[in-house]
Image (cartoon, grey):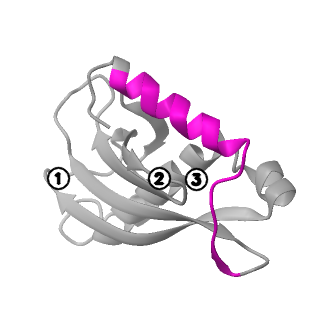
Amino acid sequence: MNLPTYRTTISPDWVDYNGHLRDAFYLLIFSHATDALMDVLGLDEAGRARTGHTLYTLECHLNFLAEVKEGERVEVRTQLLAHDAKRLHIHHGLYRPGEDASLAESEQMLMNIDSAAGRAAPIDEQGSPRVAQLAGEQQRCGLNI
């Protein structure tokens, strides 16, 4: 199960002189998908305020696989690849809705951060079961975690 996390239409100001999506905007789209994943895990605005925790991106790899043009509808599907008490290893894929061919991919390592302390911390007691639930759902669908 790849969790649909973000949908958008490619804006004219996101397109470069070659007529396709500018490389920086792939990362913006994936960043919005990470924000949506945070919401699913209870780190939305209210969750961040309650726990004082957030996620930071430690590492990000981008692969551009096909051109994306102005006006196209795209969606991000996210998979949790692995996790531990403090980290999430995720994969975002960019797709045209209803299609299975990936347009771009981003593999990322996220770290749970205690904002007040300014350092890594274990995912809180409300978020940890949500991470485990997502991992379990993906395992049941045949995705290795």
Q: Residue at x 86, y 54 (%)?
A: 50
Q: Residue at x 50, y 53 (%)?
A: 34
Q: Is residue 23 above or below residue 107?
A: below
Residue 125 appears anywhere in the view: yes
* Quarter placement of the C terminus: top left
Q: Is residue 59 above or below residue 49?
A: below
Provide the residue designation for mark 1: 67
Distance between mark 3 and mark 1 Cα atoms: 24 Å
Q: Dot 2, crowdedness within 10 Å: few (<14), some or many (≥20)? A: few
Provide the residue designation for mark 3: 35
Numbered range of the magenta stretch: 118-139
Q: Dot 3, crowdedness within 10 Å: few (<14), some or many (≥20)? A: some
Q: Is residue 91 above or below residue 136?
A: below
Disc on the earlier residue, 3 or 1: 3
Q: Is residue 29 part of the magenta span, yes or no?
A: no
Distance between mark 2 and mark 1 Cα atoms: 35 Å
| Left-right relation of 51 to 56 | right
Distance between mark 2 and mark 3 Cα atoms: 19 Å
Q: Which residue of the protein is positioned furthest toward the bottom in this rendering?
A: 118
Q: Position of residue 19 (x, y in %)?
A: 22, 61
